[in-house]
Image: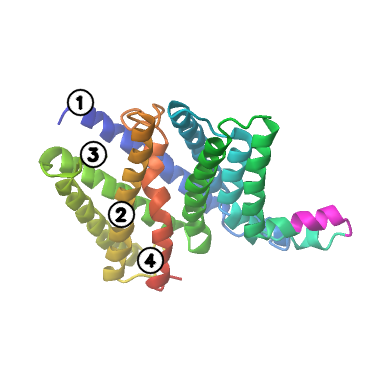
Amino acid sequence: MNKAMLKRIVFGFGMTAVVLTVFWLDHFLSQPAEDSSETMIASWRSAGLPILAVLGTLLVVGFFELNAMAREAGTRLLAPAGLLGVLLITALPSLTRMSFHPFRSDPQTWTRLLGSIFESPLLIVSLVVLGVFLNQMLTRRVEGALLRIASTLLAVTYLGLGGVMMFSIRVDYNLPMLLVFLGSVKLTDVGAYFVGSLLGKHKLIPWLSPGKSWEGLLGGVAMAAVTGVFTWWLAGQWSWFAYPLSCGASIVFCVIPGIVGQFGDLCESLLKRSAGVKDAGNLVPQFGGVLDILDSPLIAAPVAHVMLILLGAQ
């Protein structure tokens, strides 16, 4: 085992410990209060705010990493509107589930409007698009406007919609299910990396990602399948949560998003190669930038939702 691989393992365990701490905090804060008569307070407690705070922070860093890549490609993102759009869209599952009825019943028109907006996801998304155009107009420039608006909307949809799909697994299903999703996708990455490093001979797509191999992909799929079996067994042994999937369904849920996550890695590689950079950033030693970590779950999260629906998870 070379030194770089050893460092990658050490930092990987460190990041796993941080993630588990955040999940524990989210679980602790989501426990029902003794007096839950205040509907809004109860809804805020169950809204997954620690997960949302950490995910939002990571997406902000990812936005600036995308902006750095855009600069290398000859343009830049519209930061104010784009950042706000990413955060608003990511927070939609919490915003739409919190009780805004006290606002809507307020006699003040503007307060009623505020309550209505936060309960209308499509309206928020539409206002984000409007804000991006307005942001560009405020620069008083037409040169490169198409590229800047298009790049910003790409960032908003890539980060915002991917982020909201990840976060809505926490809100629509439960906290452990989000942990299973993230674990399966990232363990697929781990399996693909180690098997590919040790046994990889046949390149998967050399013009886009020379380091990926078919052997690595198969190793990642095997790791995802093992994750599915282990999760099903652990849920049955410890009753740590009401796991709604059978052993076979658990394997399917872990394997298919894991494979799509590998495609998500290739999607980010496409952006990096277009910008002429090796990594999205250098914030995380041995891993690159935040986007180099989030690329797989951002693309895999919508497919995970589809799988949960098809597999009847409630």
Amino acid bearing label 4: Met
x, y percentage for residue 145? 58, 35
Q: In what element is the residue under mark 1?
A: helix
Q: Is residue 144 above or below residue 172?
A: above
Q: Residue 3, which numbered label?
A: 1
Q: Tell me the residue that label 3 is attached to.
A: 207
* First in sequence: mark 1 vs mark 3: 1
Look at label 3 and name its amino acid: Trp
SS for callout 4: helix
- Prevalent SS, magenta region: helix
Seen at 54% across and 34% down, the residue is: 77
Crowd band around label 3 with a 10 angstrom C-alpha radius: few (<14), some (14–19), many (20+): few
Q: In the image, which is nearer the foreground, mark 2 or mark 1?
A: 2
Is 9 in the magenta? no
> How far, Cα to Cα, is label 3 from label 4?
31 Å
Magenta-tinted stretch: 107-115
Q: Which mark is on residue 258?
A: 2
